[in-house]
Image (cartoon, helix red, strand yellow):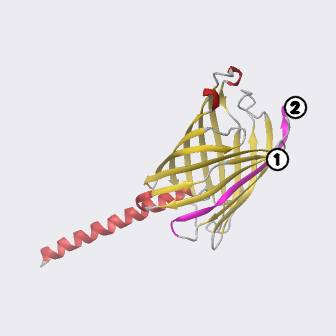
Amino acid sequence: MKYKLSILSFIMCLTIKAQEEKSSLSNAASDATNPLAFVTKVQVQPNFTWKDNDGRQINLTSRVIQPSASIGLPFIKSNDPSKIYTIYRLEVPIIGQTFPGNPDGDATGLADLILLDAIVFKQKWGLLGAGPGLIFPTMKPEQISSRKWSAGAAVVVLNTKTKGLQWGFLAQQYFNFAGDKDRESKNFMIFQPILNKILGDGKFIQLGSILNFNWTDQTYHIPIAVNFGKAFSKSLSILGGPEYVVSGPNKGDFTIRFQINAMFATTTKK
């Protein structure tokens, strides 16, 4: 009898452990796809793009995403970080491109940096984030940099009420305010629809693209993209997928995306 009870206990322990691991992977997938999750992230994303006229581009974008139990600035502490906190995000792109038909477009270097500071408010339906954004021009090479300083605001709306589904958007509106006088001043929006489906075993699907609306010269960059990803542990996820530009000056561009996402638990949240 004791022998049978021992076997039964062992099987129950294995079952509970398997369920816990499955739940942990689902939570990791949710954190990986949630831009406002209270989790420190370091992302490395190489994109490979095939352009018209045999042009090629490699865009290696790195992001550091750091949550803080503060309100806007690190020294202004939140009374309840479980409901109000801040997400800082720094985006650093390195671009290499070559155009056999137009050598003047060939360039390799550090592109403009983007810094976001979003205050996040927890809602019954999900998360709402808003705050300032700043684009730092690297100035060289001129084929890659906008050579203009830009400031603006970012808004993130993310509905998480439905289990296993996230939907919303990230909108960034910028205005040039300084920089190269030979470059035309512009105001533009970077808009990213968010639709994430969390599947079992840490797998997930992302539908969405990064759209660019240039209000100054009325040009629009509209791609369609789908990404497939998996969380392998609470601290690591990988995704990849194709993107095709359906409208705008870069219509016809085809991109393959990859992303390695390292996550680190933040213990300051209540």
Task: Give whichever of 28, 252 is nearer the camera.
Answer: 252
Specify the quadrant that holds the C terminus: bottom right
CB-based contact (under 8 Å), mark 2 and mark 1: no
The numbered dot on residue 181 is 2
Q: Label 1: state its secondary structure.
A: loop
Q: Label 2: state its secondary structure.
A: loop
- The secondary structure that dominates the magenta segment is strand
Cα distance in 3D space between marks 2 and 1? 19 Å
Task: Tell me: 10 left or right of 134.
Answer: left
Labels 2 and 1: the sequence-earlier one: 2
Furthest residue toward right: 181
Residues in magenta, as a range: 163-183
Q: Residue at x 70, y 31 (%)?
A: 144
Q: Amino acid at mark 1?
A: Trp
| Image quadrant in which you'd find residue 181 | top right
Q: Residue at x 52, y 61 (%)?
A: 197
Q: Is residue 174 magenta?
A: yes
Q: Is residue 268 depicted above or below 94 in this figure?
A: below
Task: Tell me: 181 left or right of 56.
Answer: right
Task: Give whichever of 146, 138 is nearer the camera.
Answer: 146
The numbered dot on residue 215 is 1
Pointer 2: residues within 10 angstroms few (<14), some, or many (20+)? few
Image location (x, y in percent) of residue 48:
56, 36
Mark 2 vs mark 1: in front:
1
Q: Is residue 224 depicted above or below 95 in this figure?
A: below
Pointer 1: residues within 10 angstroms few (<14), some, or many (20+)? few
Q: Across the whole image, how many numbered discs are drawn on residues?
A: 2
Specify the quadrant that holds the N terminus: bottom left
